[in-house]
Amino acid sequence: MSEIIEESIVLISSSRPESSDVIGTGFLIHKGLRTIYILTCAHVIKAVGGEKSIQVYGKPAKLLASSNIDDFDLAIIQVEHQNLTNRPSLKLKRFERLFEKSVRVAKASMPSA
């Protein structure tokens, strides 16, 4: 695995005591001065107890967007974490040719902070 990919991986856990043994991972995809944005799977959010229980290295995180687990199974979370802003963010690429039909990719702007 490439060093950039490894360094962009973060640990997601639950703030709920009854789910303290549940963990997942995500990828840092964008960072501001103190805020980072992470791409993970929607099933990770569900497993840690839902949007009010998400933590990244013990810091509370906010769910920004989530798809249905049965569809794309993706979620984006935001967390203020000064210690992670020095990590590289994973660069995402478009793979439209993998689909048999034409797809439209929605563009979202990420805040700078």
Image (cartoon, helix red, strand yellow):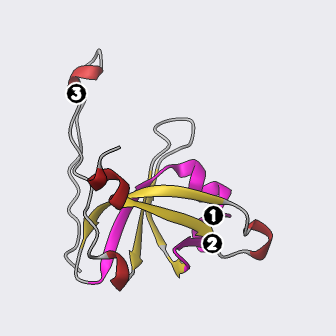
Residue 96 numbered mark, or none: 3
Which kind of residue does numbered mark 1 sit on? Gly
Q: Residue at x 22, y 51 (%)?
A: 91
Q: Is 31 one of the magenta-colored residues? A: no
Q: Amino acid at mark 2?
A: Ser
Residue 91, above or below 109 = above
- The Cα atoms of the two marked residues, 1 and 3, are separated by 31 Å
Disc 2 designates what residue?
53
Sequence-wise, which precedes: disc 1 or disc 3?
A: 1
Q: Residue at x 72, y 74 (%)?
A: 16
Above or below, 42 against 31 in this view is above
Element type where label 3 sits in the image: helix
Q: Position of residue 34 (x, y in %)?
A: 29, 83
Name the disc covering residue 50, or none.
1
Residues shaded magenta: 34-58
Pick whichever, 18 or 50, lies toward us. Answer: 18
Q: Mark 2: which secondary structure?
A: helix
The quadrant the N terminus occupies is: top left
